[in-house]
Amino acid sequence: MTQPSFFDIVGFGPDGWGGILLAGALMTFAVAICGMILGLIIGTLGAWAKVSGGPITRGLAEAYTNILRGVPDLLVIFLVYFGGSAVLTNISAFAGNTGFVSFPGFIAGFLAVGVTSGALNIGVLRGGLKAVHPGELEAAQAFGMSRMLRFRRIVAPLVLRHAIPGLGNSWLNVIKESSLLSVTGVAELLRQAQVGAGSTNRPFDFYIAAGIIYVAIAALSGLFVLFAERHYSRGTRRL
């Protein structure tokens, strides 16, 4: 009997796994987007604490950064997943139920990814904030701009101009971190590739296909980052 080709296995035919791999890629993208948003929120608060906060907030932000940078990402995923499951199980037991209650893998995934990416984003956004010249803020204040207007029209565009390359690297790191969520049963890309490899005994084909999809996501992300960098660098001289 003729063995199916690589394209038969990973394609969208009747026996192909293309649709399942695509669904896994969409799950990877969803986890990464949610995790990146959370990481940007944490990064913004942490960068503000390091630049403009008091001694306590600066110390908390510094401790958060050092701890999260020193802890493996997989350990953070385990802590969030099993810690959340323990909390839900205790709440369920208090209500009179018995048995283990699993924490939703998707929520655990983007929380863990967001917490770890937030530590990196703090450094990136802090550098962007420090690059904003005080004279630009003083000029905006002299024109009578409110604090929110100064942030929207002066601070945010200037910070993004300097921070976009670093945030692009953070995004790619989030995409790769999402592959670790397969240990919690989240049906992301690598998990679907593992299932397909075990079901067909063709691991090389599925892992090659997953690698191609990851590279495609990274390439498209790179184009988006380049476009954003050019957009926020309008009016500046290129070296």
Image (cartoon, rainbow, N blue to C red):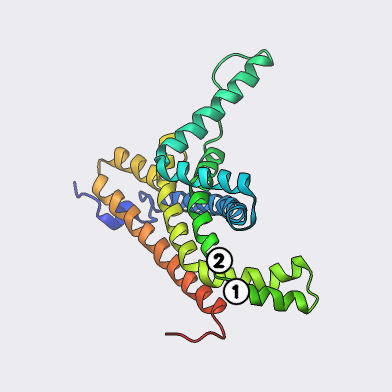
Q: Quadrant of residue 52?
A: bottom right
* Position above or below: 16 against 134: above
Whole-angstrom CA distance, mark 1 to mark 2, is 8 Å
Tag count in the figure?
A: 2
Judging depth in this view, the residue of 134 and 13 nearest the camera is 134
Is disc 2 surrounded by few (<14), some (14 to 19) or many (20+) residues within 10 Å? Answer: few
Residue highlighted by disc 2: 130
| Amino acid type at mark 2 | Lys
- Judging from the image, what secondary structure is the residue with disc 2 in? helix
Label 1 crowd (10 A; few <14 / some 14-19 / many >=20):
few
Residue 69, disc:
none
Up the image or down, 185 lies above or below 215; here it is above
Tell me what residue is drawn at x 40 percent, y 67 percent.
Answer: 219
Residue carrying label 1: 133
Residue drawn at the location 45% of the way across and 72% of the way down:
223
Q: Position of residue 214 (x, y in %)?
A: 38, 57
Q: Position of residue 211 (x, y in %)?
A: 32, 55
Front residue (pair 162, 31): 162
Quick check: can you spot residue 225?
yes
Residue 142 pos. (x, y %):
77, 78
State which quadrant residue 86 falls in.
Answer: top right
Residue 187 visible? The answer is: no
Q: List the single residue furthest toward the left.
A: 1
Q: Residue at x 60, y 25 (%)?
A: 88
- Which residue is rendered at x = 30% and y = 49% of the image? 206
Left or right: where 140 falls relative to 164: right
Query: Looking at the picture, does residue 164 appear above or below residue 31?
Result: below
Which secondary structure, mark 1? loop
